[in-house]
C-alpha cells in the first residue's frame, strides 16, 4: 500500500522507524518531511499528509509528533480525514474496523517503537467493517450530525 508519512521534530525518530518497518513489509512509504531535526510546527506537516490522503494520492497516512495530539487535531480539520491517535493495539484495530480511520497518529513520547509497530500493523491489517459503522462514519461529515 502507498502510505504518506510526516512528523514534527518531536516525532522524527519514530517516523523513521515506522518507515523502515513499512518498507520491510513491502509497503510504499513516502516521507513528506521534515528531513532534519530542526524545530518545526506540526500543523504544517499534518496538513501535507491530510491533503495527500483526501486527494486520493495516498489511501492512508501516518503522522507522528510528541504525543500524536497536535497532528490529529490538525488533520481532523480537513474534510474527509478521520485521524485516530492510538497507543494500544486494540484502539488501533478498532480505529480501522469501526471508524475507517485514514490517518494514524502516534506519539513518540508516548509509545515505544515495538508497540508503535504493533499499532501500525493492527491498523493497516484490519479491514473496515462497514454496515452500521459505514452509516456512522458518513454522519461524521454531516454538519449537525443528523
Ligand atoms: C512539540 O514540542 C510538541 O508539542 C509536538 O510534538 C506535539 O506533541 C504536539 O501535539
Image (tube, grey):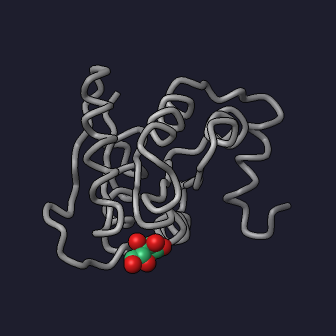
Residue 39 x/y as whole percent: 24, 79
Residue 18 x/y as whole percent: 34, 41
Residue 41 x/y as whole percent: 32, 79
Residue closer to the observer: 31 or 20: 20
**Which quadrant does the N terminus fall into?**
top left
Count of marks overlaid on the render:
0
Asked if residue 101 is positioned above or below residue 12 in the image, the reply reads above
Residue drawn at point x = 32 percent, y = 31 percent: 22
Residue 63 x/y as whole percent: 40, 55
The reply, left or right, for residue 114 in relation to residue 127 is: left
Residue drawn at point x = 59 percent, y = 25 percent: 126
Residue closer to the observer: 39 or 98: 39
Asked if residue 33 is positioned above or below residue 113 in the image, the reply reads below
**Which quadrant does the C terminus fall into?**
bottom right
Asked if residue 49 is positioned above or below residue 29 in the image, the reply reads below
Residue drawn at point x = 49 percent, y = 29 percent: 121
The reply, left or right, for residue 9 in relation to residue 72 is: left
Quadrant containing ligand 1? bottom left
Residue drawn at point x = 21 percent, y = 60 percent: 33
Residue closer to the observer: 79 or 13: 13
Amino acid at each position: 500500500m502507498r502510505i504518506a508519512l510526516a512528523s514534527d521534530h518531536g516525532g522524527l525518530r519514530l517516523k523513521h522507524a515506522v518507515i523502515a518497518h513499512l518498507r520491510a513489509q513491502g509497503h510504499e512509504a513516502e516521507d513528506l518531511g521534515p528531513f532534519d531535526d530542526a524545530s518545526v510546527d506540526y500543523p504544517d506537516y499534518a496538513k501535507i499528509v491530510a491533503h495527500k490522503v483526501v486527494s486520493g494520492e495516498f489511501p492512508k497516512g501516518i503522522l507522528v509528533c510528541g504525543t500524536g495530539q497536535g497532528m490529529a487535531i490538525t488533520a481532523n480539520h480537513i474534510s474527509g480525514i478521520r485521524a485516530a491517535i492510538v497507543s494500544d493495539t486494540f484502539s488501533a484495530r478498532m480505529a480501522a474496523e469501526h471508524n475507517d480511520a485514514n490517518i494514524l497518529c502516534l506519539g513518540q513520547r508516548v509509545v515505544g517503537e515495538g508497540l508503535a509497530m504493533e499499532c501500525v500493523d493492527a491498523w493497516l491489517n484490519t479491514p473496515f467493517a462497514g454496515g452500521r459503522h459505514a452509516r456512522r462514519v458518513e454522519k461524521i461529515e454531516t454538519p449537525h450530525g443528523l
